[in-house]
């Protein structure tokens, strides 16, 4: 689902795109990264570092490089993790990785980024081009246009994706699609319920409370149900594509 262009006065980046409680949802972050862990090795690039919590989860697997278009996110990550490598870069620019990793990447991870980019097809092409042959592009994005609601609008989302949407966007790129499925079914139900409520802030008590309850109590159940719903329903979409 694509947003009405009139509803976005400016591009939202960094902390303007997520609720504060998501920055401390460590179990959820670990689960979100779980489908990708076996493919993480060598030179790894995280695209869109956001709150920065994926750094500690990813860096044990290889040489971590974090990039973001938001200067605040880069400064905050460098302050919190002075040993890390973080740099501002725009993935809509063909040579976005040149100053970070001229030899290209073995793995690129991007979590909740593509939905913020108006021309996501160009961005995906640039990400694929930044991979070494055999390298993997690993993507997590919001799923299912029917779930689009105030929270998407407040976060600056242009769209949510179906499996067919994402398959079509990768068509013609030099990749082999290894995994494409939905993720987090109970989260999807929660997102659907929020369609029927008015939300004016991502940082309301109600929204942060929902995240905290999910993190503490609901996540294990959604994780258990996830294998049963991957083909037809979930809050997010997971994609793993290997560069040819």
Image (spheres, rainbow, N blue to C red):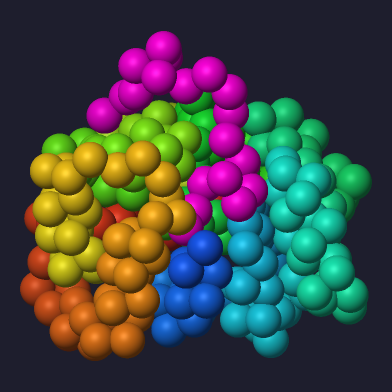
Q: Is residue 17 left or right of residue 32?
A: right
Rendered image quadrant of residue 70:
top right
Q: How many marks?
A: 0
Q: Is residue 151 visible?
A: yes
Q: What stretch of residues is rendered in magenta?
A: 1-19
Q: Is residue 180 left or right of residue 17?
A: left
**What residue is rendered at 80% in x and 74% in y?**
80
Q: Position of residue 45 (x, y in %)?
A: 69, 60
Q: Position of residue 56 (x, y in %)?
A: 67, 81
Residue 195 higher or lower than 133, as above or below:
above
Q: Position of residue 188 (x, y in %)?
A: 19, 58
**What residue is rendered at 40% in x and 30% in y?**
158
Judged from this view, the residue extending furthest toward the front is 205
Residue 25 higher or lower than 174, as above or below:
below
Q: Position of residue 226 (x, y in %)?
A: 18, 74
Q: Is residue 129 left or right of residue 43?
A: left
Judged from this view, the residue extending furthest toward the top is 6
Rendered image quadrant of residue 234:
bottom left
Front residue (pair 198, 166): 198
Label the magenta part by its dominant secondary structure: loop
**What residue is rendered at 62% in x and 57% in y?**
50
Q: Is residue 6 magenta?
A: yes
**What residue is rendered at 39% in x and 55% in y?**
204
Q: Is residue 35 visible?
A: no
Front residue (pair 22, 98): 22
């Amino acid at each position: 689902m694509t947003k009405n262009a009139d509803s976005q006065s400016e591009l939202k980046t960094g902390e303007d795109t997520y609720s504060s409680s998501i920055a401390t949802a460590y179990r959820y972050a670990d689960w979100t990264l779980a489908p990708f862990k076996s493919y993480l090795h060598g030179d790894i690039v995280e695209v869109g570092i956001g709150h920065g919590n994926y750094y500690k989860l990813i860096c044990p697997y290889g040489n971590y490089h974090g990039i973001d278009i938001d200067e605040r996110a880069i400064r905050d990550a460098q302050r919190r993790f002075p040993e890390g490598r973080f740099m501002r870069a725009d993935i809509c620019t063909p040579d976005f990785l040149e100053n970070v990793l001229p030899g290209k990447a073995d793995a690129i991870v991007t979590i909740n980024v593509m939905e913020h980019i108006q021309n996501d097809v160009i961005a995906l092409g640039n990400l694929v081009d930044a991979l070494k042959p055999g390298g993997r592009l690993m993507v997590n994005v919001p799923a299912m246009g029917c779930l689009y609601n105030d929270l998407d609008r407040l976060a600056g989302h242009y769209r949510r994706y179906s499996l067919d949407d994402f398959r079509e966007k990768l068509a013609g790129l030099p990749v082999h699609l290894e995994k494409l499925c939905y993720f987090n079914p109970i989260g999807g139900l929660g997102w659907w319920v929020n369609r029927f409520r008015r939300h004016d802030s991502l940082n309301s008590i109600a929204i942060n409370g929902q995240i905290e309850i999910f993190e503490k109590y609901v996540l294990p159940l959604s994780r258990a149900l996830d294998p049963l719903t991957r083909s037809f329903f979930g809050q997010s979409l997971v994609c793993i594509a290997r560069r040819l």
